[in-house]
Image (cartoon, rainbow, N blue to C red):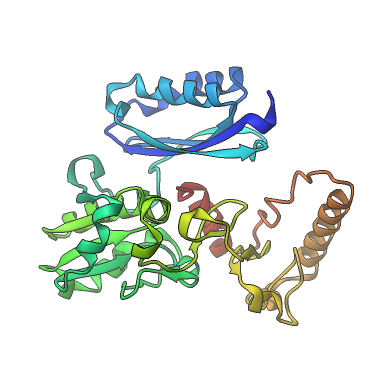
């Protein structure tokens, strides 16, 4: 495969799939046959994935999924990959395609889609309460003005936040996330709790930044993304952030100027948490990354540095990043 011709495709679709496990083997085989890599999650509530490969190969996988009438309406986003960003293909069976932790019938109870071109008019309504369904480290670098920040460290904390704010019932609620999957599931959660009028941004922040003209752009700051770009702005131009390879928080220029920042090892947020073994492991990986870069090579661990976690919180964050990548 000519890696310069590779594309990446991100997709999800909520549907009732009690037989989801039956799809794993043929899907894995098809991806292997077509040299497609990435991750696809299958669950009784639907499918969620990010894959890459030659354009015809990636589209063959998507077409195969859509042969199931329950997935026929599945949308996807394509982008040039330059080189294939994944090293292997994983088709995983999960309880949920994005982990909320409570049973929610998204296919039958999601709120109302709002296209990016209509989003500004909705959030200008003084009766609308705007809720950012992303995690605190994402909200920290950008959001829509006036949006409520639930302050969650993972998506599974959102149900508790909803229960703690009964005063929102009876209000118009508009929810948004990176690519649409979390805000769509969040509206179904609110419907479960008796909310009647709930809306979510079709295609998420990324579609908004891609399609809304610059003069109409209400987004402030950058949008955290779950890939090597780390953050993007209007028009999906790459932002200024890098990623801490230890705690996986986005880092702005001020963060990298801290005396506690060590490239590839730690930032001021996690510097004090590293034990000697963890620090030595990260330092060795960073040495190998730098050596590969000096030779014009790609280090296999550069993008995934810090995946081995020393705490449950960090492991949970990595799992969420896999699931929430759109």
**Residue at horizontal 69 percent and vertical 57 percent from the top:** 306
- 8 relative position to 181: left or right: right
**Residue at horizontal 28 percent and vertical 22 percent from the top:** 69
Q: Please provide percent x and percent y for residue 54.
A: 59, 26
Q: Give the image quarter of residue 308.
A: bottom right
Residue toward you, 291 or 247: 291
Res. 289 visible in picture? yes
Farthest-out residue, bottom: 259
Residue toward you, 225 or 95: 225
Residue 139 sits above or below residue 64 on the image: below
Residue 235 sits above or below residue 129 on the image: above
- Quarter placement of the N terminus: top right
**Residue at horizontal 53 percent and vertical 19 percent from the top:** 30
Q: Disc count in the image? A: 0
Residue 74 sits above or below residue 262 on the image: above
**Residue at horizontal 42 percent and vertical 38 percent from the top:** 11
Q: Please provide percent x and percent y for residue 325.
A: 49, 49
- 142 relative position to 309: left or right: left
Residue toward you, 191 or 224: 224
Q: Please provide percent x and percent y for residue 33.
A: 60, 17
Res. 38 visible in picture? no
Q: Please provide percent x and percent y for residue 80.
A: 57, 38
């Amino acid at each position: 495969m000519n890696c310069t011709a590779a594309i990446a495709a991100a997709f999800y679709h909520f549907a009732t799939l009690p037989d989801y496990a039956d799809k794993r083997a043929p899907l894995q085989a098809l991806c292997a046959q077509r040299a497609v890599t990435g991750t696809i999650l299958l669950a009784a509530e639907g499918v969620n994935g990010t894959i890459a490969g030659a354009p015809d190969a990636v589209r063959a996988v998507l077409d195969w999924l859509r042969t199931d009438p329950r997935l026929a309406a599945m949308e996807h986003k394509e982008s040039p990959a330059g080189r294939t960003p994944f090293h292997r293909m994983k088709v995983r069976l999960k309880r949920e395609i994005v982990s909320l932790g409570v049973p929610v019938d998204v296919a039958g109870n999601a709120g109302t889609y709002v296209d990016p071109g209509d989003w500004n008019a909705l959030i200008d309504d003084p009766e609308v309460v705007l809720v950012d369904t992303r995690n605190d480290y994402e909200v920290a670098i950008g959001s829509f003005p006036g949006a409520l920040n639930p302050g969650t460290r993972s998506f599974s904390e959102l149900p508790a936040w909803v229960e703690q704010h009964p005063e929102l019932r009876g209000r118009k609620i508009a929810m948004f996330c990176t690519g649409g999957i979390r805000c769509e599931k969040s509206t179904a959660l609110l419907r479960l709790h008796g909310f009647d009028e709930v809306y979510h941004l079709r295609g998420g922040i990324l579609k908004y930044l891609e399609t809304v003209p610059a003069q109409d752009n209400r987004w402030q700051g950058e949008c955290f993304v779950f890939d090597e770009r780390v953050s993007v702005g209007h028009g999906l131009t790459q932002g200024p952030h890098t990623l801490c390879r230890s705690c996986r928080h986005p880092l702005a220029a001020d963060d990298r100027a801290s005396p506690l920042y060590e490239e590839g090892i730690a930032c001021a947020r996690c510097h004090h948490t590293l034990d000697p073994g963890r620090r030595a492991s990260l330092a060795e990986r960073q040495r190998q990354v730098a050596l590969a870069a000096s030779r014009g090579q790609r280090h296999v661990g550069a993008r995934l540095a810090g995946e081995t976690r020393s705490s449950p919180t960090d492991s949970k964050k990595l799992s969420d990043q896999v699931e929430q990548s759109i």
